[in-house]
Image: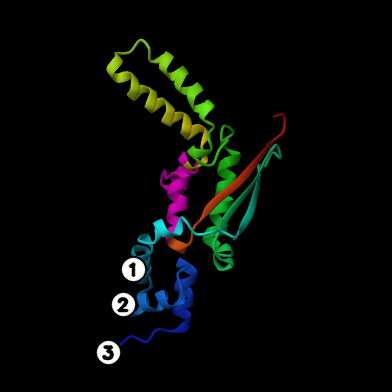
Amino acid sequence: MSTTISAADVKALREKTGAGMMDCKNALVESEGDIDKATELLRVKMGNKLGKLAGRETSEGTVQSYVHATGKVGVLVQVECNTDFVAKNEDFIEFAKDLALHIAASPATKYITEDEVPQEDKDREIRVFEELAADKPENVRPRIVEGQLKKWFSEVVLLDQEHVNGDKHDGKTIEQLRGDLSAKTGENVVVKRFVRFAVGE
């Protein structure tokens, strides 16, 4: 006996995952109308598309803000995706708002990705770390420098940082949260730019 799939179920699954109508319908048929199972099936299916998603042009998205209760710190963040449908998705908007809050609480953040860090800044940090490791045995120095550089990246590079609200996000980094959202929506989610304002800085 085949399960009857209602249009409301397809719509609900689409809103939850951001997947296409036919993908949602097929997943519901396969899971015999079980929305949770259908969501799992779609996540597995979308997981294979993640690499392809990364190359897709982003032309939709949202700008969200956060202003601290004191009125002394404020952030604007721009997050992009592929379709207007996902741009209006609650999870997508929530991610952008959470990101603005995180940046407000992370004053050292200057870059979105490691690739944006100027080579001269990396070289300067490496020289400092090499000097600090000079008294250590020669064979362990490169590992120490590499560890220190990674730690520095986690202070200045947004995607490398664990979200400040660790309890809510299980200690995941911003990049992991971005990847989860991309898998869930089936779209290329890109943190485009941010600006942090602070009184006295």
* Tag shown at residue 193: none
Residue at 33% x, 85% y is 3
Residue at 50% x, 41% y is 113
Instruction: Compute the Cα span from label 3 to label 2.
Output: 13 Å
What is the quadrant of residue 88 in the picture? bottom right
Q: Amino acid at mark 2?
A: Glu
In the rendered image of this protein, does residue 119 appear above or below residue 87?
A: above
* Residue at the outermost bottom position: 1
Q: Amino acid at mark 3?
A: Met
Residue at 53% x, 52% y is 190
Left/right placement of residue 169 relative to residue 93 reads left
Residue at 36% x, 60% y is 47
Q: Quadrant of the C terminus?
A: top right
Residue 12: % across, % down: 47, 74
Query: Residue under circle 2?
Result: 30
Left/right placement of residue 11 relative to residue 75 reads left
The kind of secondary structure element at disc 1 is: helix
Left/right placement of residue 33 relative to residue 116 reads left
In the rendered image of this protein, does residue 167 appear above or below residue 21?
A: above
Q: Residues within 10 Å of mark 1 (few under 14, many from 20)?
A: some
Q: Amino acid at mark 1?
A: Leu
In the rendered image of this protein, does residue 110 appear above or below residue 186?
A: above
Circle 3 or circle 1, nearest the eye: 1
The kind of secondary structure element at disc 2 is: helix
**Membership of 199 in magenta stretch:** no
Could you tell me if the residues under marks 1 and 2 are in contact, i.e. CB atoms within 8 Å?
Answer: yes
Q: Nearer the viewer, residue 64 or 171?
A: 64
**Membership of 167 in magenta stretch:** yes
Query: Residue under circle 1?
Result: 41
Query: Residue under circle 3?
Result: 1
Instruction: Compute the Cα span from label 1 to label 2.
Output: 9 Å
